[in-house]
């Protein structure tokens, strides 16, 4: 296979994104910054936290301490949603119930529609055959500072035991394998002040490239390390050349112009589609087809015309450009529900949190005295249940929030929710295939927690660089995949329960299976097909991506298909402008990966954790909770190089302000020469 170093900053923007798919109280609210974030996340020592003043309102009836303490009325908080946001909100607030002689200062009830509750959409469950199943595989990026911090605080969770090492991934377009994204800080240390610069120990290509990359500031280091597969050029495939790669530099102006935590930038860029962003950047058609389009379909999970320009830039920045190794990602060694949420729930329950699965909220009502009533759908045909409370934290997705607001005048009447009906979701489908193991075990494979697999040999060879393949839309000319991206995972190399070494010591040969997961994004075109039809699409997608033989259906021991309709946040044009702050109204708060988009520069799980802490902070200030742990670790600061670029683009915007998005120099020159009036 022919490989060449990538000669352009653009590759950083896209390859690094291939893994997919702040405020705090001053005293008396407790502060906890876990120094172990450096160890588990390799992000360097935590920076000083941004703080907001602690405003403790006069004691309300719910928190009054006058008179006999036994008559004190406890504050009751209901958290709706059992995913990362919901559990993180409970974690922050429940610390008020620690070391108080068994008295709970706050009564917390967590509700989730799924029966198991823990983990929500991300958690998963065990099938009737006792096999773990999840609605998609989820990664943990190096810059998930708050996520690592909160995991370190869970009793019974050791992050290095729960998560594997940082792992590379491989990008595929519809014309074949494109490139391997490396693990940037695998050898160099923590990326902080004590980072070790590798010595030039020999004159091999790899040694020279790592030495050069280590001496360049981010984001200029990744292009030296990433490898492009140009073997397709001789077979009639894509012919991405140096000119195509250099055209990607046209995005530098927009990247520098876009302030990640600036409201004005979001207002300017979020109204425009990403397709206009790439047109203004002047990137080549080949570069778009090979890099941009595939990654848009697996990160924001939508094509350029249906993706906000702000979302595209923010996504690339957060997952790639903000610091050295920002795109490096770790994967759970098993089910997230079992490795993380099980012990987390036990910890919360010890603090008095009541976790109620199978509790679907139908509406929220507010009384004249400011209290809330949560109406629940009956699960058994009886009268609907209800829960009264003092405060509500919504930790649900955008479309779920829209449905709930529509059914709840107490929510829909608020100014912050007036555009909730315009928010959309992405439909995803997860297919987990349990296959008869190949008679020959393939060993010495790169990436993941384990280096062996029992997948068919041609497939194992195709995935030799990594157990994760990131695939763009239109694969194999399959009609159902026209606008659907997907990821392929070899779980024998990722999950310890399926590993060959574990099998050899604990599982009979007759019970061993190879395990392949295929997660589809924007799967509207086939979500309503039956399981067998979707399984067939998954098998064809794998075969088309790797150019390998299609797995025979007779070799499938078990297949489990999970559908998540409109369940994942869709970052379409204007979506961030519809996104609310964490406080909706008095006693009503909200958190999730779609909330406060113009705030803390984070995405995915990290954004859910951050907004949960922010929502808990707002609630704690409003109700006078003294011992909540709500500190938010700020996102990485701009590098000196990016700061300099920002100053230049700011000056240019003042001299020649664009009416839409800033063009690249060559596009600007073309527009001026052709007499266009809107550069």
Image (cartoon, rainbow, N blue to C red):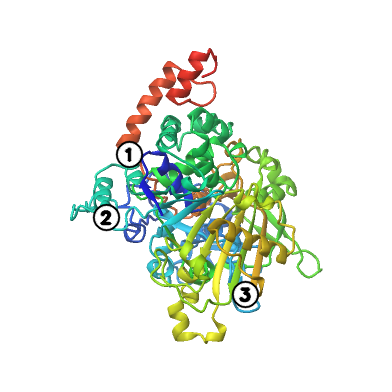
Secondary structure found at label 3: helix
Q: Nearer the viewer, residue 429 or 98?
A: 429
Q: Residue 17, percent across and down?
A: 46, 48
The reply, left or right, for residue 206 in relation to residue 4 is left
Query: What residue is shown with label 2?
Result: 188
In which quadrant of the rendered image does the N terminus lie? bottom left
Residue 555's disc is 3
- Residue 453 visible within the image: yes
Side of 485 relative to 670 (left or right)? right
Q: Is residue 272 above or below residue 316?
A: above
Name the secondary structure under disc 2.
loop
Task: Measure how far apart labels 1 and 3 are at the Cα level.
Answer: 51 Å
Query: Mark 1 vs mark 2: which is more N-terminal?
Result: 2
Of the two numbered discs 3 and 2 on the same chain, state the one appearing first in sequence: 2
**Residue at which label 1 appears:** 639
Residue at 28% from the left image edge and 53% from the top image edge:
206
Upstream in sequence: badge 1 or badge 3: 3
């Amino acid at each position: 296979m022919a490989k060449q170093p990538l000669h352009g900053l653009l590759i950083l923007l896209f390859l690094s994104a291939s893994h997919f798919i702040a405020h705090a109280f001053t005293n008396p609210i407790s502060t906890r910054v876990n120094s172990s974030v450096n160890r588990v996340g390799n992000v360097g020592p935590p920076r000083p936290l941004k703080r907001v003043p602690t405003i403790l309102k006069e004691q309300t009836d719910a928190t009054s301490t006058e008179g006999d303490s036994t008559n004190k009325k406890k504050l009751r908080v209901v958290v709706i949603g059992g995913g990362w946001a919901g559990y993180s909100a409970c974690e922050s607030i429940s610390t008020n119930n620690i070391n108080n002689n068994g008295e709970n200062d706050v009564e917390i009830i967590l509700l989730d529609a799924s029966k198991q509750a823990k983990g929500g959409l991300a958690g998963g469950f065990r099938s009737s055959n006792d096999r773990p199943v999840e609605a998609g595989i989820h990664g943990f990026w190096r810059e998930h500072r708050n996520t690592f911090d909160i995991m370190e605080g869970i009793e019974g969770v050791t992050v290095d035991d729960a998560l594997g090492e940082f792992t590379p991934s491989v990008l595929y377009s519809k014309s074949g394998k494109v490139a391997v994204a490396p693990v940037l800080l695998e050898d160099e240390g923590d990326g902080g002040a004590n980072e070790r610069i590798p010595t030039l120990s020999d004159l091999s290509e790899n040694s020279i490239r790592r030495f050069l990359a280590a001496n360049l500031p981010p984001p200029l280091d990744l292009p030296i390390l990433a490898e492009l597969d140009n073997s397709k050029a001789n077979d009639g495939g894509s012919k991405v050349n140096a000119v195509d790669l250099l055209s990607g530099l046209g995005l530098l102006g927009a990247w520098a112009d876009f302030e990640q935590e600036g409201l004005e930038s979001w207002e300017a860029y979020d109204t425009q589609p990403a397709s206009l962003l790439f047109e203004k950047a002047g990137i080549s058609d080949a570069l778009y087809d090979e890099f941009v389009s595939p990654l848009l379909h697996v990160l924001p999970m939508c094509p350029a015309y249906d993706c906000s320009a702000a979302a595209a830039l923010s996504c690339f920045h957060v997952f790639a450009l903000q610091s050295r190794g920002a795109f490096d990602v770790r994967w759970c060694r098993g089910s997230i529900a079992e490795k993380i949420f099980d012990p987390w729930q036990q910890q919360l329950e010890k603090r008095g949190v009541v976790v109620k699965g199978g509790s679907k909220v139908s509406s929220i009502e507010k009384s004249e005295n400011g209290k809330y009533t949560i109406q629940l759908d009956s699960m058994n045909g009886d009268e609907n249940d209800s829960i009264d409370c003092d405060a509500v934290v919504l930790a649900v997705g955008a479309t779920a929030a829209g449905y709930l607001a529509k059914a709840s005048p107490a929510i829909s009447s608020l100014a912050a929710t007036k555009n909730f009906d315009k928010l959309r979701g992405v439909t995803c489908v997860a297919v987990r295939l349990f296959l008869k193991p190949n008679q020959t075990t393939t060993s010495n494979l790169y990436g993941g927690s384990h280096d062996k697999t029992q997948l068919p040999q041609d497939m194992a060879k195709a995935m030799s660089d990594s157990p994760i393949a990131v695939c763009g839309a239109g694969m194999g000319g399959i009609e159902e995949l026209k606008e659907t991206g997907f990821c392929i995972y070899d779980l024998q190399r990722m999950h310890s329960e399926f590993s060959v070494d574990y099998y050899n010591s604990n599982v009979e040969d007759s019970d061993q299976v190879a395990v392949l997961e295929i997660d589809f994004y924007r799967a509207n075109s086939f979500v309503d097909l039956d399981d067998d039809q979707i399984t067939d699409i998954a098998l064809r997608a794998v075969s088309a991506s790797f150019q390998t033989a299609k797995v025979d259906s007779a070799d499938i021991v078990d297949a489990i298909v999970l559908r998540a309709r409109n369940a994942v946040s869709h970052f379409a044009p204007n979506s961030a402008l519809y996104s609310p702050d964490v406080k909706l109204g008095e006693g009503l708060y909200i958190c999730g990966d779609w909330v406060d988009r113009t705030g803390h520069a984070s995405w995915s799980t990290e954004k859910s954790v951050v907004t949960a802490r922010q929502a808990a902070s707002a609630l704690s200030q409003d109700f006078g909770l003294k011992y909540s742990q709500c500190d938010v670790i700020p996102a990485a600061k701009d590098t000196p190089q990016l700061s300099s670029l920002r100053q230049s683009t700011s000056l240019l915007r003042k001299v020649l302000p664009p009416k839409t998005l800033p063009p690249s120099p060559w596009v600007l020159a073309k527009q001026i020469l052709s007499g266009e009036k809107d550069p």
